[in-house]
Amino acid sequence: MKSFASDNYAGAHPAILEAMVIANAEHTPAYGADPWTERVQGLLRAEFGEDARSYLVFNGTGANVLAIRAACRRASAVICAATAHINVDEGGGPEYVAGVKLRTVDTPDGKLVPQDLDALLVRQGDEHAAQVGLVSISESTELGTLYTPQEIAALAQAAHARDLYLHLDGSRLAHAAAAQDLPLRALTTDAGVDVVSFGGTKIGLVAGEAVVFLRPELADGFAYLRKQSLQLASKGRFLAAQFEALLEGERWRELAGNANAMAARLAAAVGGLPGVTLTQPVQANAIFAILDPAATQALRAEFPFYVWDHATGEVRWMCSWDTTPEDVDAFAAAIRRAVA
């Protein structure tokens, strides 16, 4: 039975596992001083630009919190959407580890716009208020919506004009780039983003994310922050080997593209059903819908997925790199039975 709960439920892609087995064949220097890490640094520069400085970490929370630590002083504030992963699903990690205050904006689609910044900057220079130093956005957003390169560039320009940095939580950056048929740098480097958390776990890696600095000076001293924050892998080649398999030949585009296509297939199959109300445009690999609670209960007995908002009955269905048309059609048939 395939799950539609989270793309984290999916296993690892066979090419990723094969790359790890190959990396396991011999001894090699530890802590990232290995040929796999060196090659991945080059592949990430090819994706994000020659000035990019990249560091591999274990997980998305580590990548986000470390990016915030690198860009902000302690006691700073970070502007983000109220639905942002750093606000809702990091267990208070940004506050506890990075020592920042999150200043949130309620948005209907999970996306910030430049006008959102000024309302939270009225106390800049006031020592009694946490001083905003960073804006953080997610691409794709936690509601499955996408920023265009132009929207990100407008936010970057607005942030920089106010002496703020822009961080992009890219746990699903691959899905956003595949959906818009763009290179990764179009949504990051070329749009003026300063630091990216580039996700791999949701598109076929066992474990691993990359913190990519597009403003190189932010990376100064980052190696010490990574070690201090428990995110330095001794056998770093196993993280790097996974990213090498993901980046070579843009395998990420194929895997993310499949997840997106399966979400579009599911939305097309159930979007017009009586009893199913889609609440967000389906732009990447997430579908949000409102069902009757009884239908949700019956459906979850067959297929795992999350209730997003218990008050409204909104649910979230996620498609993964390994979701097949047959999986989608079986789930769509179950949805039809549940709402009939």
Image: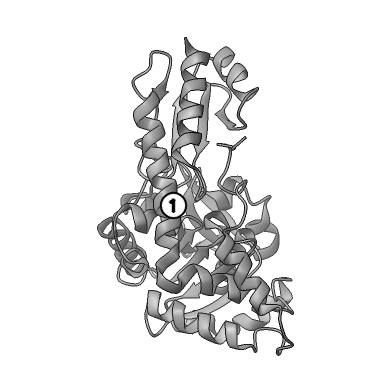
In the rendered view, does 104 fall on the left or right side of 58? left
Q: Residue at x 39, y 24 (%)?
A: 270
Q: Viewer-proximal residue, 110 or 75?
A: 110
Q: Is residue 164 visible?
A: no
Res. 193 in view: yes
Q: Quadrant of residue 241?
A: bottom right
Measuring from the top left, give residue 59's x and y in whole percent.
Answer: 64, 62
The x, y position of residue 127, in whole percent, is 56, 63
Give residue 44's quadrant in the image.
bottom left
Figure coloring: one colour
Give the x, y percent position of residue 17. 63, 65
Relative placement, left or right, of 37 versus 134 is right
What crowding class fits label 1: few (fewer than 14 Cα within 10 Å), some (14-19), or many (20 or more)? some
Percent of width and height locating residue 224: 67, 82
In this view, the residue in front, 98 or 239, is 239
Q: Is 331 on the left-hand or right-hand side of 100? A: left
Q: Is residue 314 above or below residue 209?
A: above
Q: Would you say 250 lies left or right of 104 here?
A: left
Looking at the rendered structure, the kind of residue marked 1 is: Leu
Q: Which residue is mark 1?
A: 120
Quadrant where the N terminus sits is top right
The residue drawn where x is 39% and y is 49% is: 119
In the depicted structure, whether residue 340 falls above or below residue 258: above
Per the image, label 1 sits on a secondary structure element best described as: loop
Q: Spot the residue most to the left.
A: 150
Name which residue lies at 40% across and 84% down.
51
